[in-house]
Amino acid sequence: MNELLQYAFIALPWTVAIILPLVMVTWVVVGAQSASLWALVYFAFLFCFPNASWGLVETTAGSNFYTRGTGTLFFSAINLLLFGVALQCLVVRRLGAVHVADNNLKAPVLIFGALLLGNLVVGLALPKVYWFQLLAPSGLMNVFNLMLAFYVVTTCLGEQKALDRFVNGLLVFVVARGLWGLARFVALGGDPANFYANFQRIDVRITFFDINDSLLATAALMVAAWRLLSGQAQSFAQRCMYIGIVLLELFVIVFSYRRTAWGGLILALLLLAFSAKRAQRAWLLGSYLLVGLPLMVYKLVQRGGATTHGGSLLEKILPDVVSHGSFSFTTGRFAELYAALLSIRESPIWGLGAWGYYDGFRFSDLNWHRGDFTWMHSGVLHIALKTGLIGVIAVLLVAVGVFRFVAGHSSRLAPRERGVLLAGAGGLLFSLPNFLFGTPLIEFRTMQLLALMLALPYCAVAVADRRG
């Protein structure tokens, strides 16, 4: 008996080595028949769990599947799941078993594909550039991940049943997380990843520090608000439910105390107002001006904290940008952007490569970077640093392409699909301030949800076209 156990123990690694690839192949082929369910499972993780440890006092508390597996497999567990779902979608497309949502972003996709391939070829040829720098999140890896996620969503959600299930699932997950955020805010002191209280000593409690929770709240808010405005909520109970969702998600966003979230919310709400009927537009814009604007100014001043006491209104609203009544574009929050611009000038057309970095050592304001100058608080400048003007042009082509698509198709859609289109477009507008002044390129979750927002308008139109 002991000998049998010994032989079994010796054979176990070999058995696993043989069976695991067979299981993976079976999952890809058989699971391809329900790829939309796998896509929902994949995004459910993104809906429910943050990946930002920034703001936590104990950074080890932020470890999760966004980092798990990177020590052995280099890519995280969630990134490997993305690869698997994308492979399933490739099989689905080859089998012709799904109606793919068409898009008008093929030109920028080809540009980014060429840039990624060029970076890989050139980087491997350079003696002081290592393969892990080419695949690092601080480079262009998350642009590739975004393209994969866009591929997955446009493959899986081009049919009515799949899109409805996905959007309703999004609402369920986001509302559940919002209720948790509300309960934690009221009874447990709010999100422990509170950068303002933990490091800036500003006396505020927050719902969620991760900008993506506010992004998802905006998408859910757009769906719920549009169902109210377009008359899709037939019963009194449905209207109460959607009003509750709108109020809950507004609370989540406002009490995140993220200025990029507040700016993005304003843009998304303006889109909602100008998509509504004329009478509805009038009272929506009126409520924004009479209620929303004063509340936003009050929260901005409150967010400034005691350190801005006695300063001007502008200093209280933008304490890290305005000092002694004047803007500073070379110190404070803008110091890293200024340093990045100086380095971008060395290669403005092609950039410095996925492995590139800017010279931040000359600025004492950037000591908190601890010598890591491969990223900055601007997605646009990140792209410019790594890929130069060519990459920035590709980003602009994406923005122009998707919003031209939205403008050209929005008015002809039925209310159900139009709500999905507006959720995607509203999510993109919400993401604009963060893309300009945040760190989206180094964050896996941010880029994946950005891909989702990019894809939703195309899926909504695909479903509408299929129904005729």
Image (cartoon, helix red, strand yellow):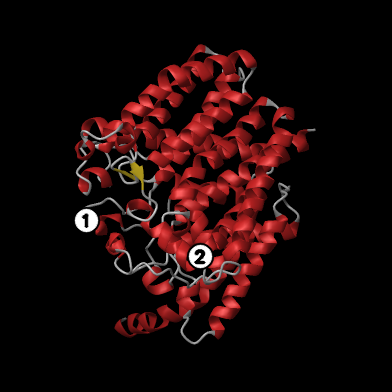
Return the disc, 1 or 2, that comes first in the chain's sequence: 1
Residue 54: x %, y % from top left: 31, 53
Residue at x-position 59% and y-position 67%? 25
- Mark 1 touches mark 2? (CB < 8 Å): no
State the mark number for residue 58.
1
In this rendering, the label closer to the viewer, 1 or 2: 2
Query: How far is mark 1 from mark 2, CA to CA?
Result: 31 Å
Q: How crowded is mark 2: few (under 14 residues within 10 Å), some or many (20 or more)?
A: many
Amino acid under label 1? Glu
Judging depth in this view, the residue of 315 and 410 nearest the camera is 315
Task: Identify the residue at horizontal 69%, vertical 62% (top origin).
Answer: 110
User: Which image quadrant: the C terminus?
Assistant: top right
Q: Nearer the viewer, residue 313 or 194?
A: 313
For mark 2, give the secondary structure. helix
Looking at numbered disc 2 in the image, what kind of residue is underneath it? Leu
* Label 1: few (<14), some (14–19) or many (≥20) C-alpha neighbours in 10 Å: few
Across and down, in percent, residue 317 comes to 33, 36
The answer to whether 202 appears left or right of 291 in the picture is: left
Check disc 2 and report the residue beneath it.
385
Q: What element carries label 1?
A: loop
Which is nearer the eye, 43 or 195? 195
Percent across and percent down for residue 396 are 63, 51
Q: Which disc is residue 338 wearing?
A: none
Q: Is residue 255 above or below residue 51?
A: above
Question: Where is residue 185 drawn, in percent x and y?
Answer: 27, 33
Q: Is residue 81 visible?
A: no
Q: Which residue is drawn at 46% across and 81% down?
A: 14
Number of labels in the image equals 2
Direction from residue 99 to residue 54 in the image, left or right? left
> To which quarter of the image does residue 5 belong?
bottom left
Residue 128 in sight: yes
Residue placed most toward the observer, 124 or 394: 394
